[in-house]
Image: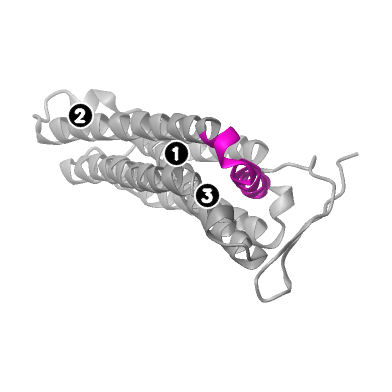
Amino acid sequence: MNIEKKYLDCILVPIGILLMVSYHLWLLYRIVKHPTKTVIGVNEINRRFWVRAMMEDVAKNGVLAVQTLRNNIMASTLLASTAIMLSSLIAVLMTSGTNGRSSWFVYGDRSDLTFSIKFFSILVCFLVAFLLNLQSIRYYSHASILINVPFKKMSQHQRHHHLTAEYVATTVNRGSYCWSLGLRAFYFSLPLFLWIFGPLPMFFCCIALVFMLYFLDITFQFGWAVGVIEEHGHMDEEFGGSGRS
């Protein structure tokens, strides 16, 4: 019976993790190839438009732009603080005694090695979330200065204006990407936390999480076409989608 329990961990846990990783690889493909059919892709496009609109009149929109970026910095700071606090908690649990741990399990391997692997996996997720949110704060801090650069007074060339706005938009989007990846690390920690209580809760959580993320990540409401022209003159993004009937 003990061998069967170990096999249950060895089978269900890798399948659950593979399911989560496969979904995110598919989502990455959709973001790259069909950005207007994903929430992340649509938000990336709209952030570029927002940056251009803010930089059209720095004197009028500068305060609004900085306040908006400051709100994003506060959101990243909250997640980073939460991640490092949970990392400290997990570290304490890893170094605590093993008394009473067996009663936590519903079904599965109860060895000390498996327990250490579970806690270490959760700890890695929280540390990754912490580092990614730090990077998000870094990019947003840079963008809060760059977005107020009076580039129209510095140069009269439209090409320079376009390149400056694109660079600022890229910086803002990188901050948003890091924030999104940090949030995904929190999502990954949920099934790993339920793994403490056995492989069955972890496996079913992976399935439920993939279904939930699908409806949060996919959109069919961005039904118009737009192109963004790169400096070399070709369309780097070609958007368009049909609405869901």
Mark 1 lies on residue: 183
Q: Residue at x 67, y 37 (%)?
A: 215
Residue 177 in percent (x, y) is at 49, 49
Pick the front one: 235 or 207:
235
10 Å neighbourhood of mark 2: few (<14), some, or many (≥20)? Answer: few
> Marks 3 and 2, how far apart in space?
46 Å
Q: Name the secondary structure under disc 3.
A: loop
Compare marks 3 and 2 and give the one earlier in the sequence. Answer: 2
99 vs 85, left or right, is left
> Marks 1 and 2, how far apart in space?
19 Å
Mark 3 lies on residue: 150
Pick the front one: 236 or 191:
236
Quadrant for residue 110, please give it.
top left
102 vs 77, left or right, is left
Q: Name the secondary structure under disc 1.
A: helix
Instruction: Check the image and report above or below for 5 versus 18.
Output: above
Magenta region, residue range:
40-62
Mark 2 lies on residue: 89
Q: Does the magenta stretch include residue 203?
A: no
